[in-house]
Each structure stands twice: as structure tokens, then as C-alpha cells.
Amino acid sequence: MKQRKIVVTGGGGFIGGHLVGALLAQGHQVRCVDRKPMEDWYQTFDGAENVVADLQQLASCMAACDGMDECYQLAADMGGMGFIESNKALCMLSVLTNTHMLLAAKEHRLESFFYASSACVYNTDKQKTEDVVPLREADAYPAMPEDGYGWEKLFSERMCRHFREDFGLRARVARYHNVYGPFGTWEGGREKAPAAICRKVIQAKRTGNLDIDIWGNGKQTRSFMYIDDCLKGTQDIMASDIIESINLGSNELVTIDGLVDIVEDIAEVKLKRHYKLDAPKGVNGRNSDNELILRYLGWEPSIRLRDGMERIYRWIHDEYVKKYR
Ligand code: NAD
């Protein structure tokens, strides 16, 4: 592979941190930019140029793209349902980051620009029952995405498209469906279901209080993609000729109760479940239709949910013990 100069924005975050590690291992020169203080980055690599900057500012985006060949734009205010349902304005303000990053990519004539969109762009009317039909790319329109976060993602996808059409920017867009793995958020309010459930099970086991709160009735269906599959798909999409926004997710469907079963099995414990029906729970059912990505790139998730959950559980367990002894 040819060595490139690549900027990863949001590189102090979960997916960005893993991506920086992978790009360095492939021999690329990497600039990693994030707004958080560096001690809060999930991973830092000495081999990268590490920059703390707020990419809502145009000047920071210009500096981030200066001298680079490619950009992976992952910076966004995001989190699990608990976060995005109560921070809609904050999520929508990521439009500043996406707008300024696109302008900077155009100005600095970057060869390629990757944008991390989300399954939250899909029309919520198609996700009302647990008994889901997997979401195809065309299901984003007519538009009725997740309020706040989803609308911003759909708008920014559209902006990537028009920067490509009008300015010739080689923009690629993936719609990520729930990504999980180590070196991500596992407590504090932004964590997603796989990490939250692992933490709750670990906590129950260690305190001996064998109860667990579950958001919703446990019957909501979802799919979860392990980080290694996400990285491979992201780079495959970046290298491809695919110009439309494309699903990148697992199609192994599971209920939230099923996910708790898996974690209980890994932890070798059985908990009493308390269903919090008024907690944020998102849509009732969602799965990824992978026909297009399989056809175009031969990409399929390679890590079974049970195996990936085993890995994230072990990592959160170690973090939990380090923090709470
Ligand atoms: P993350 O929260 O771990 O990482 C995002 C990073 O962006 C954070 O470190 C944050 O500090 C940084 N950031 C936010 N605003 C910034 C700004 N103005 N300037 C500089 N840095 C800023 O999230 P993640 O899970 O790694 O997600 C990466 C991308 O993938 C995001 O765009 C997210 O919306 C998208 N996505 C993720 C998932 C998932 O399941 N993790 C699903 C769909 C889409």
C-alpha cells in the first residue's frame, strides 16, 4: 500500500483511536486531531502527530487538513440513546465540524474524504416494530431520521454528496450501525448498550447486588459490529468507487434481552432484570441490510457477537477493577 499523509479527526475517540493505530501499523503518516484534552483520549500513539483542537472552528479544520492527502472525519458529539435523546442541539452542532472540515478538505485539495454517518439517518417509521426488515440504503428517504443526531448526519451526508458533485471532492460515506469494542466509552452517560450492559453485569457481580436495570422492555432488536470489522469496512469503502452512502454494520440481529443473556453467560452469573419502560430506548427494531456492501466489496462481518462481547467484557472488567478496585 502506498504511504499516505492522513488526518483522523475525532482520533481521541473510540473508532478514531483504533483507526489511527491501524493506519500507523500500515506505514502511513498520521495526524490525529481531537477536542478532548489528550489525557482523555482512549488511545494515543507516539508515532502520530497528536493535536488538540476544536474542529467546530474553521481555522482548526484548515490546520488539520494542511499538507494532508486524505481525511477520515469521525469527530462528532455522540453517544448512546441516553445521550442523543437529551442532547439534540449539541448533536446538531456537529454540523459546524462537518461543514468546516469539508471546506478545509476542498481548500487543501485533499484526494479523499471519509465521513462517518450513522444508521440513525434511517426513516424512523420503518423501525417501529421489533420484527424488523433490515434497512436498505434507500430507506433513508423520504427523510424522517432520529431527531437531532440523525438529522445532522443526513444533512452532512448530503453535503458530502454535493461537495463531490459540485467541487469534485472524492467523498465517501459509510452508515455505521452500532460499533462496539475495547477502548471506548463504558460509563458516564455516553456509553452504548454493549458497554453499558457489560458494566452493569460486572458491577452486579462485584457488589453482590444481583439486579440489573434494562432500558425498555428488553425486546428491542439491534445489531452490533465489532471494531475490527468496522475498520476493515471503513478502509475498503474509502478505497472504493462507491459514491452513495452505504451501510457498514453487522446483520446478526439480537434483542437487548439476548445481549444480556450473552453477557451473563460470559460472566457466569444470572441477574434479576428490572425493565425501565420510561428510559430512553431508541427505535424498537433496527438491522443492517448488507446486500450492497457484499456485492460491491465482498465485505461481511467476520466476528460473531458472542466473540466480540467476550473481548469487550474482558476489557471493561479490567478497566472497572483498575478504577474501583
Ligand atoms: P467517540 O465519541 O468515541 O469519538 C468522537 C470523538 O470526536 C470524541 O473523542 C470527541 O472528543 C471528538 N469531537 C467531537 N467534537 C469535536 C470537535 N468539535 N473537535 C474535535 N473533536 C471533536 O465516538 P465514536 O464511537 O468513535 O464515533 C466516531 C464517529 O462515528 C462519529 O462521527 C459517530 O457519530 C460515528 N458513529 C459511531 C457509531 C458507533 O456505534 N460508535 C455509530 C454510528 C456512527
Image (cartoon, rainbow, N blue to C red):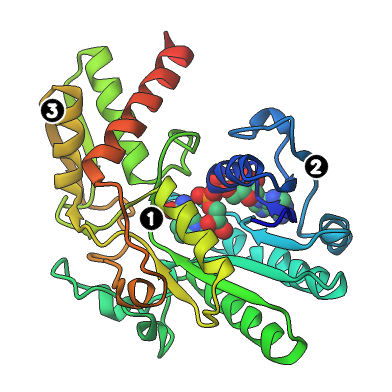
Which of marks 3 and 2 precedes in the sequence?
2
Amino acid type of the residue tagged 2 in the rendering: Val
Residue at disc 1, CB closer than 8 Å to ligand 1:
yes
Q: Quadrant of the N terminus?
A: bottom right
Amino acid type of the residue tagged 3 in the rendering: Leu
> Residue 282 placed where, x, y %?
32, 61
Q: Is residue 280 above or below residue 38?
A: below
Q: Secondary structure at mark 1?
A: loop
Find residue 178 and name its label: 1
Q: Nearer the viewer, mark 2 or mark 3?
A: 2
> Residue 281 placed where, x, y %?
30, 56
The quadrant holding residue 187 is top left
Which of marks 1 and 3 precedes in the sequence?
1
Q: Is any part of residue 3 visible from this angle?
A: yes
Dot 2 crowding, Cα within 10 Å, few <14, some 14–19, many 20+? many
Residue that numbered label 2 is attached to: 51
Q: Is residue 234 above or below residue 171?
A: above
Q: Is residue 96 left or right of residue 225?
A: right
Which of marks 1 and 2 precedes in the sequence?
2
Q: Secondary structure at mark 2?
A: strand
Residue drawn at x 19%, y 75% as measured from the top left = 133
Residue drawn at x 78%, y 62% as measured from the top left = 69
Distance from Cα at disc 3 to Cα at disc 1: 25 Å
Amino acid type of the residue tagged 1 in the rendering: Asn
> Residue 138 placed where, x, y %?
38, 86
Distance from Cα at disc 2 to Cα at disc 3: 44 Å
